[in-house]
Image (tube, coloured by chain):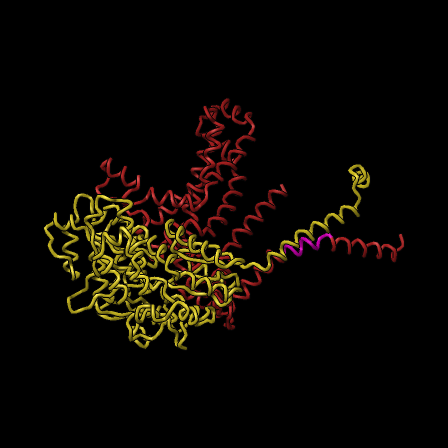
Chain colours: A yellow, B red
Amino acid sequence: MTHAYWNRNGLTRRGALAGLAATTALTALPRTARAQDVTLRWWSPQSAPLQVEAYNHQIATFQEANPGIKVVFETTSDEGYAAQLAAAFSSGEVPDVVTHLPSFSIHTYYASGLVEPMNDVIEAVGADDFYDGANDVYKAADGNFVATGIGNVAANMLWLRTDLMEEAGIDKQPTTWDELRAACQAMQKNGIYGAPLPYGRNSMTTRIFVGVMHQAGAQVFTPDLEVAIDSQETRDALEWYKSMRELCPPGATNYSWGEAITAFVSGATATGIYTGRVLGNVVAQNPPIADHITCKVYPTISPDVKPWTFNAFPSVFIPAQSRHIEEAKKFAIHLFEPEGMIKQLHAAPGHLLPVLKSINANPIYQDNPIIKKYPTEVDRMAAAAADGHNLGYETKAHRSNDRAGDVEGTLAISDMVQRVVLNDEDPNVVVGETAKIIEDVMKG
Amino acid sequence: MNPARRTRLEREYALLGAILIAPTVLIFCAVIVYPLVSAIYLSLFQVFTPTLEGSWVGLSNYRELLGKEEFWTSLLNNIIWTVGTLSLQIIFGVAMALILHQNMWFRSLARSLILFPYFVSTVVAVLVWKWLFNDLYGIMNHLLIVSGLTDFPIDYLGTMPNAMISVILVGAWKYFPFVVIAVLARLQTIPDALYEAARIDGAGPISRFFDVTVPQLREVLVVIIMLRAIWDFKEFDMIYLLTGGGPITSTQTLPLLVYKEAFKLNQMGMASTYAVAMMAIMLVFMILYIRRTRSEEDT
């Protein structure tokens, strides 16, 4: 039967096999030709539509200048990047360039030999063009730079509705926690809540609360990276954070970045806590309040304690397992080209702030409607971010902490907040247990 | 027949059998045995996920697991979630199947639409439910406030017991169509004569349901319960996207704990230990299921 079938169609087994072999050979030919091309995978958690549009412009100009190199942009997320990178590193299928991740996460990877030093990229961009100390946060114990900054952010700016302040008879922007709480109490009416502080089990709660701890004079680690969270100052921070719960929307118990910014931008809360992304979102989504918003550094427990701004130090780094290190470095350098970089910064004006002096001084960068409309706010954020810190860089005196990413990953700090605020557990016990968890992480 | 010749023939048949079964065995080894052995092997090491480098720790991961409160809390959450959502799936599923079994208008359309939650992607379903639950803009809170049932929005996902109840309800909504399909298929095979006989004997609708329908559905319900118990026990994406395991660890089930250990704490060894423990627990369900299906085959 089979034989008849072959004959009926004028085919023979030998002919079919020859055809198959020829098809295979033809399929292999373009592969050989394509093998000379390079495809770079670029990951970033910053993926608002306008930002992706700016990235596509940067990719297009790079590809035009570098025939044979193709760049593919892939989105990751603030809450998911750690898992995605862990899977990528363990499988060896890594992205070639990763941008906008917080500085402390990269130190963890570098300590395990997973990240390529970026010294030559910094040199190529122009080390002197970076703001003073802008790359200090990326310096590893061996003196190498594990990444370089692609922008600055001031993640915990206090956003205020000036119209609501006026209505409530508040004539002074709060500088202490007591003043802030009083202001929120006065403005919480007519369905508007005082503040959208996050109480969720996530990285935002961790990062914001690390800021609150510092605003109380506490710290998570000593400069020598001994765990120092078990202190009276931490308990003070928890007590204040708990007292603010009644001034936040009910769902703040599950808030992360998206919910927190939406609450303020939509007008549901009288104050906000976020980066400069608020500016663009208010102008686009709620223009009636656009002339009634301002920002300042978040208040502290008392005038004696200096403000503390959380700057994630969004970065550019290259995984050491990348098969195209040289091309990836070339692309990383290209990201700092003024035209593309300015487009990228303008995609979220005020959210990401320049790390290069030449970009900030560039008239094209300054010629943006939002930057021009809110010069005071942009200046305040730039100053706060320049003096900013994070969990891996709590003060300038702190040693580089290559376990900070793991500490955030345990969610121990956000769990601590939830246990005290939502479960009403004894802060003394909770803080002690949290210290133990962090100590265990530090020991590995 | 010559014994020597028979032996040779048998050898040839045995060889042919081995050759024929080899692909199946190889695939089975690649997709079942290898991951299983790997998981057990990894559970005996302390492994850093990104590099997969590790050191031998023997059974100490298991000792740590047994002494860890988080494991027992997560197991308890897992049981509460599985029992809660499965019960609602069965109740809603059977009820809906009975309704769709009746002669009604647009029955075919209704039968198709009822499958929607089961087919919709979990990510989309969670996004929709998160908007419904939203404290500021969600329709659920809006309706409650407008109707005067409450003065303030309810926090559905951030406090207990609301978070667990919400997760269980969303799970029931998402997966009850599976029960509907299976039960409906069985209902269509129950002979009408049984109901007619019951009617002649004076049985009302309730009696007919308990005395005719339920006994006829028992076999299929056992299979559904076993399968759904296994699938619900290892549910990850829906719970993770809805609550992330919070508040604190109140909705953190074992799959979420495995994920946290493997990818947030980068402890692949410990994560494998949790996974092996999960597997041992699920083995009980599987044995029950296999026994049940075998007994069905026997009868």
User: On screen, B148 above or below A398?
Assistant: above
x and y percentages locating residue A75 in the rendered image: 43, 54
> In this picture, which residue range is highlighted in magenta?
B20-28
Quarter of the image containing the C terminus of chain B?
top right
| Any part of residue B270 in sight | no
x and y percentages locating residue B43 in the rendered image: 51, 66
Q: Is residue A39 magenta?
A: no
Q: Secondary structure of the magenta portion, mostly?
A: helix
Residue nearer the viewer, B51 or B80: B51
In the figure, is residue A209 to the left or right of B18?
left
Residue drawn at (34%, 43%) of the image? B131
In the figure, is residue A57 to the left or right of A435?
right
Q: Residue furthest top?
A: B200
Residue drawn at (43%, 29%) of the image? B206
User: On screen, A428 above or below A272?
Assistant: below
User: On screen, A219 above or below B90?
Assistant: below
x and y percentages locating residue B278 in the rendered image: 49, 57
Residue nearer the viewer, A15 or A84: A15
x and y percentages locating residue B35 in the rendered image: 57, 59
The quarter of the picture where residue A74 lies is bottom left
Residue nearer the viewer, A399 or B292: A399
Residue nearer the viewer, B224 or B178: B178
